[in-house]
Image: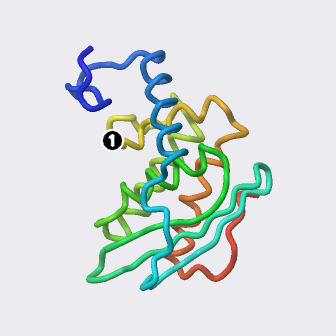
Amino acid sequence: MRWWRGWPRFRRCSVSSDELRELYQDVIIDHGKRPRNFHPLDDATCTAEGFNPLCGDQLKIYLRLANGVIEDISFQGVGCAISQASASLMTLAVKGKKPEEAQALFARVHTLLTEGPNARVTPGELGKLAVLSGVWEFPVRVKCATLAWHTLRSALEGGASQVTTE
């Protein structure tokens, strides 16, 4: 298989589980060590905080909604590499989307993470977020990967209280 910038060159090519696992590890480590959009957003219109008591992950999501789209998004927090990487990848995936598109993406990611190969979601539908598909193999880590997504949903719905994964 030919790789271009870390992703399959042809969408219809199948990726072996070993290749996906290696890619998963590389991307998680990269985004865990150097998360994208990791800063406060001073002109945020929505915020929400999330906490995963199982792992100790904590984060705050900042959103700026304008003209019916997520114009900007960032986060801050501490946590394991999976929670940081998931938040980082999430910010890249939802920027520029309508809130309802972000909610639909949350549903697809959550389904993939909780149902694994039984999910009716294919990694191809998720683009770069597909690297999170490897998390389902480690059920204790699913909450780490979904924390940012639950917190995003809370921010989009008004962010009244702290979100927990419990």
Q: Amino acid at mark 1?
A: Gly
Is residue 134 positioned above or below 83 on the image?
A: above
Q: Can you give x and y, in whole percent of width and height, for residue 77 in the image?
A: 62, 63
Residue at (39%, 35%) from the top-left corner?
A: 123
Considering every residue shown, the one lying at the far front of the view is 34
Q: Quadrant of residue 95?
A: bottom left
Q: Can you give x and y, in whole percent of width and height, for residue 12 in the image?
A: 23, 24
Residue at (26%, 20%) from the top-left corner?
A: 13
Q: Quadrant of the N terminus?
A: top left
The mark tally for this picture is 1
Residue at (36%, 55%) from the top-left corner?
A: 93
Is residue 57 positioned above or below 17 on the image?
A: below
Q: Can you give x and y, in whole percent of width and height, for residue 86 in the image?
A: 52, 49
Left or right, residue 62 beside residue 123? right
Q: Quadrant of the C terminus?
A: bottom right
Which of the pair 131/41 is nearer the observer?
41
Q: Can you give x and y, in whole percent of width and height, for residue 3 in the image?
A: 26, 23
Which of the pair 76/143 is nearer the observer?
76
Secondary element type, mark 1: helix
Give the residue at mark 1: 127
Residues packed near mark 1 inside 10 Å, few (<14), some (14 to 19) or many (20 plus)? few
Residue at (42%, 85%) from the top-left corner?
A: 43
Which of the pair 159/61 is nearer the observer?
61
Q: Quadrant of residue 91?
A: bottom left
Q: Quadrant of residue 150?
A: bottom right
Considering every residue shown, the one lying at the far left of the view is 10
